[in-house]
Image: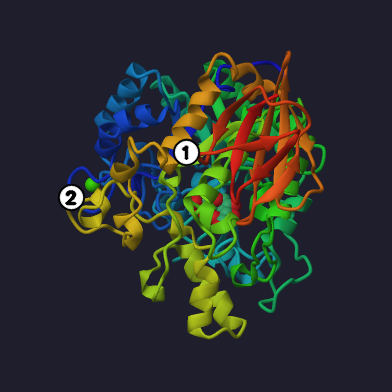
Protein backbone atom coordinates (compact mmCIF):
# COMPACT_ATOMS: atom_id res chain seq x y z
CA UNK A 1 0.00 0.00 0.00
CA UNK A 2 1.26 3.45 -0.91
CA UNK A 3 1.53 5.94 1.97
CA UNK A 4 -0.83 8.91 1.91
CA UNK A 5 -0.92 12.22 3.79
CA UNK A 6 -4.20 11.38 5.50
CA UNK A 7 -3.23 7.99 6.97
CA UNK A 8 -1.91 9.49 10.20
CA UNK A 9 -4.85 11.85 10.70
CA UNK A 10 -7.97 11.69 12.84
CA UNK A 11 -11.38 12.64 11.44
CA UNK A 12 -14.25 14.30 13.30
CA UNK A 13 -17.79 14.11 11.98
CA UNK A 14 -20.06 17.09 12.56
CA UNK A 15 -23.80 16.79 12.22
CA UNK A 16 -24.32 20.53 11.81
CA UNK A 17 -27.96 20.65 12.79
CA UNK A 18 -27.10 19.36 16.27
CA UNK A 19 -23.63 20.76 16.82
CA UNK A 20 -23.81 24.39 17.86
CA UNK A 21 -26.51 27.00 17.23
CA UNK A 22 -25.03 30.49 16.93
CA UNK A 23 -28.24 32.50 16.47
CA UNK A 24 -30.82 30.96 18.78
CA UNK A 25 -33.18 29.46 16.20
CA UNK A 26 -32.66 26.01 17.68
CA UNK A 27 -30.75 24.72 14.65
CA UNK A 28 -26.99 24.28 14.61
CA UNK A 29 -25.22 26.21 11.86
CA UNK A 30 -21.95 26.99 10.10
CA UNK A 31 -21.05 30.05 12.22
CA UNK A 32 -21.53 27.67 15.15
CA UNK A 33 -19.01 25.26 13.64
CA UNK A 34 -16.53 28.10 13.11
CA UNK A 35 -16.92 29.14 16.75
CA UNK A 36 -16.04 25.63 17.87
CA UNK A 37 -12.93 25.17 15.72
CA UNK A 38 -10.70 26.04 18.65
CA UNK A 39 -12.31 23.23 20.60
CA UNK A 40 -11.69 20.78 17.75
CA UNK A 41 -8.10 21.91 17.59
CA UNK A 42 -7.81 21.32 21.34
CA UNK A 43 -9.16 17.82 20.81
CA UNK A 44 -6.50 17.31 18.15
CA UNK A 45 -8.53 16.23 15.13
CA UNK A 46 -7.29 17.17 11.66
CA UNK A 47 -10.07 16.43 9.19
CA UNK A 48 -13.68 17.52 9.62
CA UNK A 49 -16.55 15.90 7.77
CA UNK A 50 -19.73 17.95 7.65
CA UNK A 51 -22.99 16.11 7.15
CA UNK A 52 -25.01 17.86 4.40
CA UNK A 53 -25.59 21.61 4.62
CA UNK A 54 -26.83 22.12 1.06
CA UNK A 55 -30.23 23.60 0.36
CA UNK A 56 -32.76 21.02 1.42
CA UNK A 57 -36.30 20.53 2.70
CA UNK A 58 -34.60 18.48 5.46
CA UNK A 59 -37.01 15.56 5.03
CA UNK A 60 -34.00 13.35 5.71
CA UNK A 61 -32.01 16.09 7.46
CA UNK A 62 -30.17 17.32 4.40
CA UNK A 63 -29.67 13.95 2.71
CA UNK A 64 -32.36 15.22 0.35
CA UNK A 65 -30.77 18.05 -1.62
CA UNK A 66 -32.82 20.56 -3.59
CA UNK A 67 -29.87 22.64 -4.81
CA UNK A 68 -26.32 21.31 -4.93
CA UNK A 69 -24.87 24.81 -5.36
CA UNK A 70 -26.48 26.49 -2.35
CA UNK A 71 -26.08 26.38 1.40
CA UNK A 72 -29.40 26.01 3.18
CA UNK A 73 -30.15 29.36 4.87
CA UNK A 74 -30.85 27.55 8.13
CA UNK A 75 -27.20 26.48 8.16
CA UNK A 76 -25.79 29.80 6.95
CA UNK A 77 -24.50 31.34 3.75
CA UNK A 78 -21.92 30.55 1.10
CA UNK A 79 -19.72 33.20 2.74
CA UNK A 80 -19.91 31.21 5.99
CA UNK A 81 -18.83 28.12 4.10
CA UNK A 82 -15.89 29.89 2.45
CA UNK A 83 -14.98 31.33 5.81
CA UNK A 84 -15.06 27.88 7.41
CA UNK A 85 -12.78 26.40 4.73
CA UNK A 86 -10.38 29.29 5.24
CA UNK A 87 -10.49 29.18 9.06
CA UNK A 88 -9.83 25.43 8.98
CA UNK A 89 -6.89 25.92 6.63
CA UNK A 90 -5.35 28.44 8.99
CA UNK A 91 -5.41 25.76 11.67
CA UNK A 92 -3.96 23.08 9.40
CA UNK A 93 -7.33 21.35 9.25
CA UNK A 94 -9.22 19.93 6.27
CA UNK A 95 -12.91 20.10 5.43
CA UNK A 96 -14.92 17.30 3.82
CA UNK A 97 -18.47 17.72 2.62
CA UNK A 98 -21.05 15.01 2.23
CA UNK A 99 -21.63 13.96 -1.37
CA UNK A 100 -25.22 12.78 -1.78
CA UNK A 101 -25.67 11.81 -5.41
CA UNK A 102 -27.62 8.57 -5.40
CA UNK A 103 -30.73 10.72 -5.10
CA UNK A 104 -31.76 14.33 -4.78
CA UNK A 105 -34.85 15.94 -3.27
CA UNK A 106 -38.27 15.86 -4.92
CA UNK A 107 -38.01 19.65 -4.57
CA UNK A 108 -34.93 19.82 -6.82
CA UNK A 109 -35.45 21.70 -10.07
CA UNK A 110 -34.65 18.54 -12.06
CA UNK A 111 -37.49 16.67 -10.43
CA UNK A 112 -39.90 19.55 -10.92
CA UNK A 113 -39.01 19.58 -14.62
CA UNK A 114 -39.48 15.83 -14.80
CA UNK A 115 -42.89 16.17 -13.25
CA UNK A 116 -43.90 18.93 -15.65
CA UNK A 117 -42.68 16.97 -18.68
CA UNK A 118 -41.85 13.32 -18.01
CA UNK A 119 -40.98 12.74 -21.68
CA UNK A 120 -38.58 15.70 -21.71
CA UNK A 121 -34.88 15.84 -20.93
CA UNK A 122 -35.26 15.70 -17.16
CA UNK A 123 -37.56 12.69 -17.14
CA UNK A 124 -34.45 10.73 -17.99
CA UNK A 125 -32.62 12.11 -14.92
CA UNK A 126 -34.78 9.72 -12.86
CA UNK A 127 -36.11 6.20 -13.10
CA UNK A 128 -39.64 6.57 -14.41
CA UNK A 129 -42.12 3.90 -15.43
CA UNK A 130 -45.69 3.84 -16.67
CA UNK A 131 -48.25 3.69 -13.86
CA UNK A 132 -50.55 1.44 -15.83
CA UNK A 133 -47.96 -1.34 -15.90
CA UNK A 134 -48.18 -1.68 -12.10
CA UNK A 135 -45.12 -1.63 -9.84
CA UNK A 136 -42.09 -2.65 -11.95
CA UNK A 137 -40.56 -4.59 -9.06
CA UNK A 138 -41.16 -5.53 -5.45
CA UNK A 139 -38.15 -3.84 -3.86
CA UNK A 140 -38.60 -2.37 -0.40
CA UNK A 141 -37.15 1.07 0.20
CA UNK A 142 -34.69 1.53 3.08
CA UNK A 143 -37.27 3.61 4.89
CA UNK A 144 -40.16 1.19 4.37
CA UNK A 145 -42.77 0.59 1.66
CA UNK A 146 -42.28 0.13 -2.07
CA UNK A 147 -39.44 1.93 -3.86
CA UNK A 148 -42.09 3.09 -6.35
CA UNK A 149 -44.23 6.16 -5.90
CA UNK A 150 -46.65 7.80 -8.30
CA UNK A 151 -45.31 10.91 -9.98
CA UNK A 152 -47.97 13.52 -9.17
CA UNK A 153 -49.96 14.86 -12.09
CA UNK A 154 -48.59 12.34 -14.58
CA UNK A 155 -49.14 8.81 -15.86
CA UNK A 156 -45.76 7.84 -14.40
CA UNK A 157 -44.21 6.49 -11.26
CA UNK A 158 -40.63 7.03 -10.00
CA UNK A 159 -38.10 5.02 -8.05
CA UNK A 160 -36.74 5.94 -4.62
CA UNK A 161 -34.42 3.58 -2.72
CA UNK A 162 -34.80 5.82 0.35
CA UNK A 163 -37.69 8.13 1.25
CA UNK A 164 -40.25 9.15 -1.35
CA UNK A 165 -38.88 12.67 -1.02
CA UNK A 166 -35.54 11.28 -2.24
CA UNK A 167 -36.00 10.23 -5.91
CA UNK A 168 -33.08 8.20 -7.25
CA UNK A 169 -30.97 9.81 -9.93
CA UNK A 170 -30.52 7.84 -13.14
CA UNK A 171 -26.78 7.23 -13.37
CA UNK A 172 -27.26 5.37 -16.66
CA UNK A 173 -27.83 8.79 -18.22
CA UNK A 174 -24.47 10.40 -19.16
CA UNK A 175 -26.04 13.88 -18.99
CA UNK A 176 -26.91 13.37 -15.34
CA UNK A 177 -23.41 12.11 -14.61
CA UNK A 178 -21.86 15.18 -16.23
CA UNK A 179 -24.02 17.46 -14.07
CA UNK A 180 -22.83 15.67 -10.96
CA UNK A 181 -19.15 15.83 -11.92
CA UNK A 182 -19.50 19.53 -12.70
CA UNK A 183 -20.85 20.11 -9.21
CA UNK A 184 -18.17 18.03 -7.50
CA UNK A 185 -15.44 19.98 -9.30
CA UNK A 186 -17.09 23.26 -8.43
CA UNK A 187 -16.89 22.41 -4.73
CA UNK A 188 -13.38 21.02 -4.91
CA UNK A 189 -12.23 24.21 -6.61
CA UNK A 190 -13.37 26.06 -3.50
CA UNK A 191 -10.69 24.31 -1.48
CA UNK A 192 -12.44 21.33 0.05
CA UNK A 193 -10.15 18.42 0.89
CA UNK A 194 -12.73 15.96 -0.38
CA UNK A 195 -15.94 14.13 0.39
CA UNK A 196 -17.65 11.47 2.39
CA UNK A 197 -19.75 9.73 -0.24
CA UNK A 198 -23.27 8.82 0.70
CA UNK A 199 -25.04 5.54 -0.12
CA UNK A 200 -22.90 5.28 -3.24
CA UNK A 201 -23.36 1.56 -3.79
CA UNK A 202 -26.98 2.27 -4.71
CA UNK A 203 -26.18 4.18 -7.90
CA UNK A 204 -26.08 0.96 -9.92
CA UNK A 205 -29.43 -0.80 -10.21
CA UNK A 206 -30.07 -4.35 -11.26
CA UNK A 207 -31.79 -3.71 -14.58
CA UNK A 208 -34.24 -4.52 -16.02
CA UNK A 209 -36.44 -4.22 -12.93
CA UNK A 210 -37.74 -7.52 -11.67
CA UNK A 211 -39.18 -9.11 -8.54
CA UNK A 212 -37.16 -11.13 -6.07
CA UNK A 213 -38.56 -13.50 -3.45
CA UNK A 214 -40.44 -11.56 -0.77
CA UNK A 215 -38.75 -11.61 2.64
CA UNK A 216 -41.39 -10.02 4.86
CA UNK A 217 -45.17 -10.16 5.13
CA UNK A 218 -45.37 -6.93 3.08
CA UNK A 219 -44.52 -8.98 -0.03
CA UNK A 220 -41.41 -6.89 -0.72
CA UNK A 221 -37.73 -7.76 -0.73
CA UNK A 222 -34.81 -6.07 0.96
CA UNK A 223 -32.94 -3.50 -1.15
CA UNK A 224 -29.80 -5.50 -0.39
CA UNK A 225 -31.06 -8.24 -2.73
CA UNK A 226 -31.12 -5.79 -5.61
CA UNK A 227 -27.58 -4.64 -4.75
CA UNK A 228 -26.35 -8.23 -4.80
CA UNK A 229 -27.73 -8.58 -8.35
CA UNK A 230 -26.46 -5.25 -9.66
CA UNK A 231 -23.39 -5.56 -11.89
CA UNK A 232 -20.94 -3.01 -13.20
CA UNK A 233 -20.85 -0.15 -10.70
CA UNK A 234 -17.11 0.09 -11.31
CA UNK A 235 -17.51 1.91 -14.62
CA UNK A 236 -19.44 4.75 -12.92
CA UNK A 237 -17.06 4.98 -10.00
CA UNK A 238 -13.98 5.02 -12.22
CA UNK A 239 -15.41 7.73 -14.39
CA UNK A 240 -16.33 9.85 -11.35
CA UNK A 241 -12.86 9.38 -9.87
CA UNK A 242 -11.06 10.25 -13.09
CA UNK A 243 -13.19 13.31 -13.87
CA UNK A 244 -13.27 14.79 -10.37
CA UNK A 245 -11.33 13.39 -7.40
CA UNK A 246 -8.12 12.41 -9.16
CA UNK A 247 -7.37 15.72 -10.88
CA UNK A 248 -7.95 17.45 -7.52
CA UNK A 249 -6.03 14.87 -5.50
CA UNK A 250 -9.11 14.76 -3.27
CA UNK A 251 -9.58 12.55 -0.25
CA UNK A 252 -12.72 10.40 -0.40
CA UNK A 253 -14.38 8.02 2.00
CA UNK A 254 -17.13 5.84 0.63
CA UNK A 255 -20.18 4.77 2.57
CA UNK A 256 -20.19 1.24 1.24
CA UNK A 257 -22.09 -1.52 3.00
CA UNK A 258 -22.37 -4.06 0.25
CA UNK A 259 -19.29 -4.48 -1.84
CA UNK A 260 -19.07 -7.96 -3.32
CA UNK A 261 -16.50 -10.50 -2.12
CA UNK A 262 -13.09 -9.73 -3.58
CA UNK A 263 -14.01 -6.17 -4.58
CA UNK A 264 -12.25 -4.40 -1.72
CA UNK A 265 -9.10 -3.71 -3.69
CA UNK A 266 -11.03 -2.18 -6.58
CA UNK A 267 -12.75 0.11 -4.09
CA UNK A 268 -9.84 1.23 -1.93
CA UNK A 269 -6.63 -0.30 -3.23
CA UNK A 270 -3.89 2.07 -4.43
CA UNK A 271 -5.79 2.58 -7.69
CA UNK A 272 -9.21 2.34 -6.02
CA UNK A 273 -12.38 4.32 -6.62
CA UNK A 274 -12.04 5.96 -3.19
CA UNK A 275 -9.25 6.74 -0.75
CA UNK A 276 -10.92 4.69 1.94
CA UNK A 277 -14.28 3.32 3.05
CA UNK A 278 -15.88 2.64 6.40
CA UNK A 279 -15.49 -0.66 8.17
CA UNK A 280 -19.15 -1.31 8.94
CA UNK A 281 -18.63 -4.97 9.78
CA UNK A 282 -19.11 -4.40 13.52
CA UNK A 283 -22.23 -2.39 12.81
CA UNK A 284 -23.95 -5.21 10.99
CA UNK A 285 -23.77 -7.62 13.92
CA UNK A 286 -27.14 -8.62 15.31
CA UNK A 287 -29.21 -6.88 12.63
CA UNK A 288 -32.39 -8.76 11.91
CA UNK A 289 -33.86 -9.08 8.42
CA UNK A 290 -37.26 -8.59 10.06
CA UNK A 291 -36.55 -5.00 11.04
CA UNK A 292 -34.87 -2.94 13.75
CA UNK A 293 -37.33 -4.13 16.38
CA UNK A 294 -35.83 -7.62 16.15
CA UNK A 295 -32.17 -6.54 16.30
CA UNK A 296 -30.20 -8.09 19.13
CA UNK A 297 -27.32 -6.97 21.30
CA UNK A 298 -23.69 -7.39 20.33
CA UNK A 299 -21.42 -9.52 22.49
CA UNK A 300 -17.78 -8.57 23.14
CA UNK A 301 -16.66 -11.74 21.35
CA UNK A 302 -18.66 -10.84 18.26
CA UNK A 303 -17.26 -7.33 18.30
CA UNK A 304 -13.70 -8.59 18.54
CA UNK A 305 -14.16 -11.14 15.76
CA UNK A 306 -15.75 -8.60 13.43
CA UNK A 307 -12.83 -6.21 13.93
CA UNK A 308 -10.23 -8.91 13.39
CA UNK A 309 -11.93 -10.35 10.33
CA UNK A 310 -12.15 -6.90 8.77
CA UNK A 311 -8.46 -6.35 9.48
CA UNK A 312 -7.59 -9.68 7.92
CA UNK A 313 -9.69 -8.88 4.89
CA UNK A 314 -8.04 -5.53 4.26
CA UNK A 315 -4.49 -6.58 5.18
CA UNK A 316 -2.09 -4.26 3.41
CA UNK A 317 -4.20 -3.66 0.32
CA UNK A 318 -5.73 -0.47 1.66
CA UNK A 319 -6.79 1.50 4.70
CA UNK A 320 -10.22 1.20 6.29
CA UNK A 321 -11.92 4.02 8.14
CA UNK A 322 -12.90 2.89 11.63
CA UNK A 323 -15.78 4.08 13.79
CA UNK A 324 -18.03 3.13 16.66
CA UNK A 325 -20.89 5.46 15.73
CA UNK A 326 -22.15 8.05 13.26
CA UNK A 327 -25.35 9.99 12.60
CA UNK A 328 -27.14 6.80 11.46
CA UNK A 329 -26.26 4.69 14.45
CA UNK A 330 -27.07 4.57 18.13
CA UNK A 331 -24.34 5.88 20.41
CA UNK A 332 -21.39 3.46 20.28
CA UNK A 333 -21.04 3.15 24.04
CA UNK A 334 -24.73 2.30 24.44
CA UNK A 335 -24.61 -0.15 21.56
CA UNK A 336 -21.34 -2.04 22.10
CA UNK A 337 -21.00 -2.04 25.89
CA UNK A 338 -23.29 -4.51 27.63
CA UNK A 339 -26.63 -3.00 28.66
CA UNK A 340 -26.63 -1.55 32.16
CA UNK A 341 -22.83 -1.53 32.34
CA UNK A 342 -21.98 1.69 30.54
CA UNK A 343 -19.29 3.50 32.52
CA UNK A 344 -16.36 5.83 31.90
CA UNK A 345 -13.75 3.06 32.00
CA UNK A 346 -15.75 1.04 29.45
CA UNK A 347 -16.17 4.08 27.22
CA UNK A 348 -12.43 4.65 27.20
CA UNK A 349 -11.75 0.98 26.56
CA UNK A 350 -14.03 0.95 23.53
CA UNK A 351 -12.38 4.14 22.31
CA UNK A 352 -8.91 2.64 22.65
CA UNK A 353 -9.79 -0.67 21.05
CA UNK A 354 -11.05 0.79 17.79
CA UNK A 355 -8.63 3.72 17.71
CA UNK A 356 -5.59 1.45 17.78
CA UNK A 357 -6.80 -0.73 14.90
CA UNK A 358 -5.02 -0.22 11.61
CA UNK A 359 -7.12 2.41 9.87
CA UNK A 360 -8.27 6.00 9.90
CA UNK A 361 -10.26 6.70 13.08
CA UNK A 362 -13.47 8.73 12.86
CA UNK A 363 -14.99 10.41 15.92
CA UNK A 364 -18.63 11.40 15.76
CA UNK A 365 -19.58 14.58 17.61
CA UNK A 366 -20.19 13.94 21.30
CA UNK A 367 -18.52 10.54 21.18
CA UNK A 368 -15.39 12.15 22.63
CA UNK A 369 -17.28 13.00 25.83
CA UNK A 370 -19.05 9.65 25.98
CA UNK A 371 -22.53 10.76 24.97
CA UNK A 372 -25.12 8.00 25.39
CA UNK A 373 -28.43 6.96 23.88
CA UNK A 374 -31.50 8.90 24.95
CA UNK A 375 -34.53 7.22 26.48
CA UNK A 376 -37.65 8.07 24.47
CA UNK A 377 -40.87 8.19 26.49
CA UNK A 378 -43.12 8.79 23.49
CA UNK A 379 -42.90 8.24 19.73
CA UNK A 380 -43.65 11.98 19.40
CA UNK A 381 -40.12 12.67 20.58
CA UNK A 382 -38.76 10.87 17.54
CA UNK A 383 -38.04 12.95 14.45
CA UNK A 384 -36.09 10.54 12.26
CA UNK A 385 -37.99 9.09 9.29
CA UNK A 386 -36.11 5.82 9.48
CA UNK A 387 -37.04 5.24 13.13
CA UNK A 388 -40.66 6.16 12.44
CA UNK A 389 -40.78 3.59 9.63
CA UNK A 390 -39.16 0.96 11.85
CA UNK A 391 -41.74 1.75 14.54
CA UNK A 392 -44.55 1.01 12.08
CA UNK A 393 -42.85 -2.25 11.09
CA UNK A 394 -42.68 -3.21 14.77
CA UNK A 395 -46.38 -2.45 15.29
CA UNK A 396 -47.26 -4.45 12.18
CA UNK A 397 -45.29 -7.36 13.62
CA UNK A 398 -47.59 -7.30 16.65
CA UNK A 399 -45.59 -5.36 19.25
CA UNK A 400 -47.51 -3.03 21.56
CA UNK A 401 -46.76 0.69 21.13
CA UNK A 402 -44.68 0.59 24.30
CA UNK A 403 -42.69 -2.45 23.18
CA UNK A 404 -42.23 -1.01 19.71
CA UNK A 405 -40.85 2.27 21.06
CA UNK A 406 -38.52 0.46 23.40
CA UNK A 407 -37.33 -1.86 20.62
CA UNK A 408 -36.68 0.71 17.91
CA UNK A 409 -35.44 3.33 20.38
CA UNK A 410 -32.32 1.30 21.04
CA UNK A 411 -31.07 1.64 17.49
CA UNK A 412 -32.73 4.94 16.58
CA UNK A 413 -30.68 7.38 14.55
CA UNK A 414 -32.00 10.15 16.80
CA UNK A 415 -29.81 8.82 19.59
CA UNK A 416 -26.90 10.37 17.75
CA UNK A 417 -28.78 13.48 16.72
CA UNK A 418 -29.64 14.97 20.11
CA UNK A 419 -27.85 18.29 20.65
CA UNK A 420 -24.13 18.28 21.39
CA UNK A 421 -23.62 18.67 25.13
CA UNK A 422 -21.36 21.66 25.65
CA UNK A 423 -22.10 22.57 29.28
CA UNK A 424 -24.59 22.19 32.11
CA UNK A 425 -26.51 25.35 31.17
CA UNK A 426 -29.94 25.46 29.49
CA UNK A 427 -30.23 22.99 26.59
CA UNK A 428 -26.71 21.76 27.23
CA UNK A 429 -25.30 25.03 25.93
CA UNK A 430 -26.31 24.05 22.40
CA UNK A 431 -28.77 26.88 21.80
CA UNK A 432 -30.17 30.04 23.35
CA UNK A 433 -33.53 29.08 21.87
CA UNK A 434 -35.49 25.84 21.72
CA UNK A 435 -33.52 22.95 20.20
CA UNK A 436 -35.07 21.26 17.15
CA UNK A 437 -34.63 17.91 18.93
CA UNK A 438 -34.79 17.50 22.69
CA UNK A 439 -31.44 17.27 24.45
CA UNK A 440 -30.48 14.19 26.44
CA UNK A 441 -31.20 14.99 30.12
CA UNK A 442 -27.85 13.51 31.12
CA UNK A 443 -26.12 16.68 29.86
CA UNK A 444 -25.90 17.83 33.48
CA UNK A 445 -23.27 15.15 34.07
CA UNK A 446 -21.94 14.58 30.56
CA UNK A 447 -20.69 17.76 28.90
CA UNK A 448 -17.56 19.28 27.40
CA UNK A 449 -17.08 21.95 30.03
CA UNK A 450 -17.05 19.45 32.87
CA UNK A 451 -14.55 17.18 31.12
CA UNK A 452 -12.16 19.64 29.58
CA UNK A 453 -8.97 19.65 31.62
CA UNK A 454 -10.19 16.97 34.06
CA UNK A 455 -7.36 14.48 33.74
CA UNK A 456 -9.43 11.30 34.02
CA UNK A 457 -12.31 12.36 31.76
CA UNK A 458 -13.35 10.55 28.59
CA UNK A 459 -12.52 13.68 26.62
CA UNK A 460 -8.96 13.79 27.92
CA UNK A 461 -8.59 10.09 27.13
CA UNK A 462 -9.53 10.76 23.51
CA UNK A 463 -6.94 13.52 23.46
CA UNK A 464 -4.33 11.04 24.63
CA UNK A 465 -5.34 8.55 21.94
CA UNK A 466 -5.03 11.22 19.28
CA UNK A 467 -1.79 12.35 20.88
CA UNK A 468 -0.31 8.85 20.61
CA UNK A 469 -1.22 8.79 16.91
CA UNK A 470 0.70 12.03 16.47
CA UNK A 471 3.66 11.09 18.66
CA UNK A 472 6.61 10.83 16.27
CA UNK A 473 8.23 8.09 18.34
CA UNK A 474 5.26 5.74 17.82
CA UNK A 475 3.40 7.13 14.84
CA UNK A 476 4.88 4.77 12.27
CA UNK A 477 3.77 1.73 14.28
CA UNK A 478 0.41 3.14 15.32
CA UNK A 479 -0.46 4.06 11.75
CA UNK A 480 1.22 1.37 9.66
CA UNK A 481 2.23 -1.44 12.02
CA UNK A 482 0.76 -4.80 11.09
CA UNK A 483 -2.07 -6.05 13.29
CA UNK A 484 -1.79 -9.49 14.85
CA UNK A 485 -4.45 -10.75 17.25
CA UNK A 486 -3.23 -11.98 20.63
CA UNK A 487 -5.04 -14.58 22.81
CA UNK A 488 -7.90 -14.44 20.35
CA UNK A 489 -9.70 -17.29 22.11
CA UNK A 490 -9.65 -15.74 25.58
CA UNK A 491 -13.18 -14.67 26.31
CA UNK A 492 -13.99 -11.00 26.80
CA UNK A 493 -10.42 -10.05 26.13
CA UNK A 494 -9.65 -8.12 22.97
CA UNK A 495 -5.92 -7.95 22.45
CA UNK A 496 -3.66 -7.37 19.47
CA UNK A 497 -0.13 -6.44 18.53
CA UNK A 498 0.79 -3.59 16.31
CA UNK A 499 4.19 -4.44 14.90
CA UNK A 500 6.39 -1.89 13.20
CA UNK A 501 10.08 -1.70 12.37
CA UNK A 502 11.82 -2.77 15.57
CA UNK A 503 8.82 -1.74 17.66
CA UNK A 504 5.95 -3.77 19.09
CA UNK A 505 2.89 -2.40 20.81
CA UNK A 506 0.42 -4.61 22.64
CA UNK A 507 -3.14 -3.27 22.80
CA UNK A 508 -5.45 -4.93 25.32
CA UNK A 509 -8.96 -4.33 26.57
CA UNK A 510 -10.71 -6.31 29.28
CA UNK A 511 -14.19 -6.28 27.80
CA UNK A 512 -16.13 -7.07 30.98
CA UNK A 513 -16.84 -5.66 34.43
CA UNK A 514 -14.87 -8.36 36.25
CA UNK A 515 -11.11 -8.49 36.41
CA UNK A 516 -9.21 -11.17 34.48
CA UNK A 517 -5.70 -12.58 34.31
CA UNK A 518 -3.77 -12.31 31.10
CA UNK A 519 -0.52 -14.03 30.23
CA UNK A 520 1.81 -11.52 28.67
CA UNK A 521 3.92 -12.44 25.64
CA UNK A 522 7.03 -10.68 26.94
CA UNK A 523 8.39 -7.93 29.11
CA UNK A 524 6.70 -4.59 29.15
CA UNK A 525 9.07 -1.76 28.40
CA UNK A 526 6.57 0.98 28.97
CA UNK A 527 2.86 1.52 29.58
CA UNK A 528 1.95 4.04 26.89
CA UNK A 529 -1.73 4.34 27.70
CA UNK A 530 -3.88 3.15 30.56
CA UNK A 531 -7.50 4.07 31.21
CA UNK A 532 -7.13 3.33 34.94
CA UNK A 533 -4.70 4.57 37.57
CA UNK A 534 -2.84 1.35 38.15
CA UNK A 535 -1.33 -1.49 36.13
CA UNK A 536 -0.70 -4.85 37.79
CA UNK A 537 1.89 -7.03 36.11
CA UNK A 538 4.19 -9.61 37.67
CA UNK A 539 6.30 -12.44 36.21
CA UNK A 540 4.69 -12.24 32.82
CA UNK A 541 1.16 -12.24 34.22
CA UNK A 542 -1.17 -9.23 34.23
CA UNK A 543 -4.20 -8.76 36.40
CA UNK A 544 -6.53 -6.57 34.37
CA UNK A 545 -9.32 -4.75 36.17
CA UNK A 546 -12.84 -4.63 34.71
CA UNK A 547 -12.88 -2.50 31.51
CA UNK A 548 -9.17 -1.89 31.76
CA UNK A 549 -7.47 -0.82 28.55
CA UNK A 550 -3.74 -0.50 28.02
CA UNK A 551 -1.24 0.05 25.25
CA UNK A 552 2.08 -1.51 26.22
CA UNK A 553 5.38 -1.15 24.49
CA UNK A 554 6.92 -4.61 24.39
O1 LIG B 1 -27.19 6.12 4.71
C1 LIG B 1 -27.28 5.02 3.86
C2 LIG B 1 -27.80 3.82 4.47
O2 LIG B 1 -27.57 2.75 3.98
C3 LIG B 1 -28.73 4.00 5.62
O3 LIG B 1 -29.99 3.74 5.16
C4 LIG B 1 -28.45 3.11 6.76
O4 LIG B 1 -28.60 1.77 6.39
C5 LIG B 1 -29.46 3.43 7.83
O5 LIG B 1 -29.46 4.81 8.01
C6 LIG B 1 -29.12 2.76 9.12
O6 LIG B 1 -30.07 3.14 10.06
C7 LIG B 1 -26.96 7.34 4.13
C8 LIG B 1 -26.93 8.44 5.17
O7 LIG B 1 -25.86 8.25 6.05
C9 LIG B 1 -28.25 8.53 5.85
O8 LIG B 1 -28.26 9.48 6.88
C10 LIG B 1 -29.28 8.86 4.81
O9 LIG B 1 -30.55 8.82 5.39
C11 LIG B 1 -29.22 7.91 3.62
O10 LIG B 1 -27.92 7.67 3.15
C12 LIG B 1 -29.95 8.52 2.47
O11 LIG B 1 -29.23 9.60 1.97
CA1 LIG C 1 -28.97 28.49 14.03
Which SS class for mark 1?
strand
Foreground pick, 124 / 57: 57
The residue under the point 35% across, 44% down is 16
Left or right: 199 in relation to 211: left
Q: Quadrant of residue 540?
A: top right
Q: Earlier in the sequence, mark 2 or mark 1?
A: 2
The residue under the point 53% across, 86% down is 400
The residue under the point 59% across, 55% down is 336
In the rendered image, the vertical position of residue 331 relative to residue 388, given as above or below: above
For label 2, count other residues whose C-alpha is less than 10 Å away and answer few (under 14), some (14-19) or many (20+).
some
Tag on residue 24? 2
Foreground pick, 516 / 107: 516
In the rendered image, the vertical position of residue 509 relative to residue 492, given as above or below: above
Tag on residue 98? 1
x%, y% of residue 96?
A: 45, 31
Callout in the foreground (2, 1) = 2
Q: Quadrant of residue 140?
A: bottom right
x%, y% of residue 62?
A: 40, 49
x%, y% of residue 313?
A: 79, 37
Count of number-bearing discs: 2
Residues under numbered marks 2 and 1 in contact, where contact means CB atoms less than 8 Å apart: no
Q: Residue placed farthest to the front in the image?
A: 539
Label 2 beta carbon less than 8 Å to ligand 2? yes
Left or right: 474 in relation to 14: right
Label 1 beta carbon less than 8 Å to ligand 1? yes
Which SS class for mark 2?
loop
In the rendered image, the vertical position of residue 116 relative to residue 49, given as above or below: below
Amino acid sequence: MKKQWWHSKTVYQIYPKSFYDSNGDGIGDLPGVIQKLDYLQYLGVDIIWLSPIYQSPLADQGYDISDYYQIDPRFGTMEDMDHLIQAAKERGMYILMDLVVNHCSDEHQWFKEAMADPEGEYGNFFYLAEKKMGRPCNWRSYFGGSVWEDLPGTEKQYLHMFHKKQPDLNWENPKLREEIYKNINWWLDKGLAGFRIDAIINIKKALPFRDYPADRPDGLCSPDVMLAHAQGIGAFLEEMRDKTFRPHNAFTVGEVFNEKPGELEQFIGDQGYFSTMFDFNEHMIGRSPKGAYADRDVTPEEYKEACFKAQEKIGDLGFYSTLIENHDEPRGVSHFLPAGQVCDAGKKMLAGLYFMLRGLPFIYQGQEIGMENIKFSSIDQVDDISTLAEYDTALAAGLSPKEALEAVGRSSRDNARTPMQWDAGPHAGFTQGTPWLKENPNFLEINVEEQRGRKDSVLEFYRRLIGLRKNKEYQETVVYGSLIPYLREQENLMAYFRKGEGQTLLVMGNFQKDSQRVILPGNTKKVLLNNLETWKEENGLAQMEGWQFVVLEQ
